[in-house]
Image (spheres, rainbow, N blue to C red):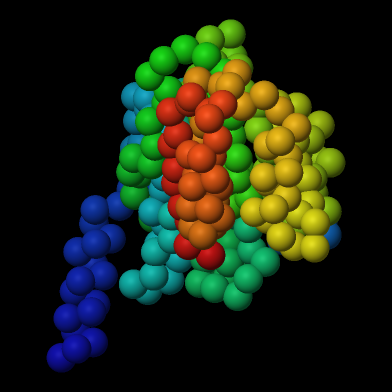
């Protein structure tokens, strides 16, 4: 009976999702990062006015949230970056995807864009890449110039640094992400920003937000979004 109820629940949840097709999958060399391009014909990307997330079905009754990093509203195609350096249902799903696979996604709100003009500061780890790239696409750089720091633990920083010059990609010293981020923040003028977005591993997000709140020079509105590892 329990298995029947689980199957019925899964079927009900699946009906709430949008169908999509995998167009391309690329694993970065020497890096636990997978770039996944999907075609989602029923998702109205042209109406997006906030950072979104896709709740993806990665296994039976298993779902993970990923942020569409870049998209083309006309072709209904979008790109997601998925870190696959840990052994989990989402990592296995991303690693096993192939061109032509059908997937189920559920678009949902993740975070608003700034309500006031001015510079935006983005602080996060590798899991926040899609979050910040989505913000980059949704904002006008002449009104909301971006600057940010992303902490990466592997070899793909130069690839992204060349492609996204607004962000600095650095490796945490001795694996200490919080101290590394705090040290980087001391190299910039925090009072110059009207909005700050912090995203990534939940403990890191909470610690950085708490630290920024104690700095008198920070007058920005702080937006946070945490991801489970």
Residue 115 falls left or right of residue 153: left
Q: Give the quarter of the image for residue 45.
A: top left
Where residue 196 appears, as percent x and y from the top left, is 52, 31
Q: Quadrant of the N terminus?
A: bottom left
Residue 166 falls left or right of residue 213: right
Q: Residue at x 59, y 52 (%)?
A: 127
Asked whether residue 214 appears in the rendered view, the answer is yes
Residue 50 falls left or right of residue 15: right
Residue 193 falls left or right of residue 148: left
Q: What is the total number of numbered labels drawn onto the structure image?
A: 0
Residue situated furthest top in the rendering = 142
- Please determine whether, in this image, residue 77 is positioned above or below residue 204: above
Q: Residue at x 49, y 57 (%)?
A: 202
Where residue 112 appears, as percent x and y from the top left, is 38, 31
Q: Residue at x 43, y 71 (%)?
A: 59
Asked whether residue 28 appears in the rendered view, the answer is no
Where residue 161 appears, as percent x and y from the top left, is 79, 35
Q: Residue at x 33, y 43 (%)?
A: 108
**Towards the viewer: 92 or 110:** 110
- Please determine whether, in this image, residue 46 is positioned above or below residue 225: above
Where residue 221 appears, as percent x and y from the top left, is 43, 28
Q: Give the quarter of the image for residue 29.
A: bottom right
- Please determine whether, in this image, residue 224 is positioned above or below residue 91: above
């Amino acid at each position: 009976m329990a298995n029947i109820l689980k199957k019925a629940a899964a079927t009900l949840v699946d009906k709430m999702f949008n169908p999509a097709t995998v167009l391309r999958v690329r694993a970065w060399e020497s890096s636990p990062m997978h770039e996944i391009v999907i075609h989602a014909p029923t998702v109205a990307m042209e109406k997006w006015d906030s950072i979104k997330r896709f709740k993806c079905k990665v296994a039976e009754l298993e779902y993970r949230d990923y942020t569409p990093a870049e998209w083309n509203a006309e072709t209904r195609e979008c790109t997601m970056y998925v870190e696959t350096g840990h052994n989990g249902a989402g990592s296995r799903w991303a690693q096993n995807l192939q061109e032509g696979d059908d997937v189920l996604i559920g678009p949902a709100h993740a975070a608003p864009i700034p309500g006031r003009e001015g510079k935006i500061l983005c602080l996060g780890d590798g899991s926040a890449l899609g979050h910040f790239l989505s913000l980059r696409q949704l904002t006008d750089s002449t009104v909301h110039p971006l600057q940010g720091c992303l902490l990466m633990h592997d070899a793909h920083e130069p690839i992204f640094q060349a492609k996204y010059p607004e962000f600095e990609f650095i490796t945490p010293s001795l694996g200490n992400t919080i101290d590394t981020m705090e040290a980087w923040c001391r190299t910039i003028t925090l009072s110059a920003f009207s909005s700050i977005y912090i995203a990534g591993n939940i403990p890191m997000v909470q610690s950085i937000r708490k630290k920024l709140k104690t700095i008198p020079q920070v007058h920005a509105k702080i937006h946070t979004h945490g991801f489970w590892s």
